[in-house]
Image (cartoon, rainbow, N blue to C red):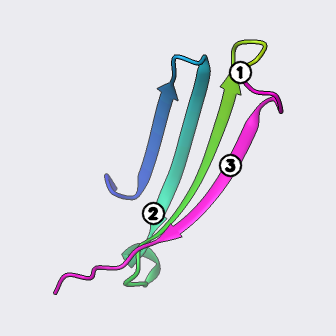
């Protein structure tokens, strides 16, 4: 369970705040390749911090072990 989910929070000096979460799929769905699916949200707290407003991001990544 400790390697199935993740959450994160971050901030920067340029007045950004970020929250992210995700799930790692792999052996629990019968696959030998870890697949990560994540979502993140970012917002700025100053007039010039983000010209486009709030941002949402969906990510998908995979990895494999090259060491044998």
* Label 3 sits on residue: 57
Q: Nearer the viewer, mark 3 or mark 1?
A: 1
* Label 1 sits on residue: 49
* Label 2 sits on residue: 24
Callout 2: SS? strand
Q: Residue furthest right?
A: 52
Which is nearer the eye, 48 or 37? 48
Q: Is residue 7 left or right of residue 50?
A: left
Residue 34 occupies quadrant = bottom left
Callout 3: SS? strand
Q: Are marks 3 and 2 in contact (CB under 8 Å)?
A: no
Quarter of the image where the C terminus is located = bottom left
Quarter of the image where the N terminus is located = bottom left
Magenta region, residue range: 49-68
Q: Are marks 3 and 1 in contact (CB under 8 Å)?
A: no
On the image, the x and y values in percent for residue 55 come to 74, 38
Q: Residue furthest bottom?
A: 68
Q: Nearer the viewer, mark 2 or mark 1?
A: 1
Q: Residue furthest top?
A: 46
């Amino acid at each position: 369970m400790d390697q199935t989910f993740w959450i994160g929070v971050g901030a920067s000096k340029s007045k950004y705040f970020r929250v992210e979460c995700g799930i790692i799929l792999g052996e629990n769905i019968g696959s030998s390749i870890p697949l990560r699916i994540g979502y993140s949200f970012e917002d700025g707290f100053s007039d010039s911090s983000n010209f486009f407003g709030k941002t949402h991001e969906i990510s998908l990544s995979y990895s494999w072990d090259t060491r044998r």
